[in-house]
Amino acid sequence: MKKDNKTVIAVVMKSTRGNEYHDVETIGNFGLDHIDVQQMFQKGDTVGETTFYGESVEGTLSKPYVLTKRKGDEAVYTNTPVFNTWQSGKNKIEAGEVIGAYQIKKNGELLTQIPIVSAKEVTHSDPAPMISHDLVRTSSTWWYWLVAGIMLFAYGLYSWMKKRSQRKQVMTLSNEKYTA
């Protein structure tokens, strides 16, 4: 059955021969009257961009998405692009290559994901390896942890030597008492 931009397929089981058509019509009309269909996205819609070795890479949807929901549905639907992180050693992104996923959520829960593909080919010609932001952060603070470790070691050594010196003084005083 068709109405506006909606098509409903109704299946009736265990109906009497005389009522089959009436039952299919009733169920089909109910579906057409209580379902809302929205064309959310078209294939090729731009949904965001990411960077690859400093060059912008536009992401487009690899397929369309139609949202079917009940009329009067008060749910909150959100759409978020989530792009892949690039691995060191990769020097090329092909046009049409999957570079992420467009997440569609209903009330915060993941409903579906649509693959995001690169709109164009991007080639990186610099032979230097890609550096991750996490690697940069940890490698630039190594000296801080080294200094902190040395200071902690020095304090521990100082405390140990001070206690050892106090024990020697106590031993010396107690030995003097017994020898006198």
Image: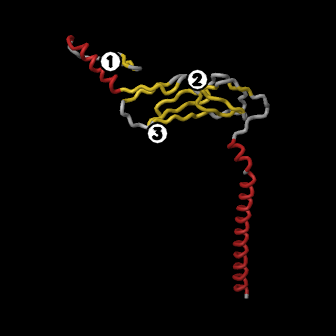
* Place of residue 39 in the rendered image (x, y in percent of width and height, measured from the top left): 47, 25
Q: Quadrant of the N terminus?
A: top left
Residue visible at 70% across and 76% down? 166
Distance (Cα) linking label 1 and label 3: 31 Å
Is 166 left or right of 69, judged from the image as shown?
right
Which residue bears the numbered disc 2? 44
Q: Earlier in the sequence, mark 1 or mark 3?
A: 1
The secondary structure type at the circle numbered 3 is: loop
Residue visible at 49% across and 27% down? 40
Few, some or many residues within 10 Å of mark 3 (<14, 14–19, 20+) = few
Q: Earlier in the sequence, mark 3 or mark 2?
A: 2
Distance (Cα) linking label 3 and label 2: 25 Å
Among the 4 quarters of the image, the one containing residue 31: top left
Residue visible at 46% across and 35% down? 77
Foreground tag (3 vs 2): 2
Which residue bears the numbered disc 3? 108
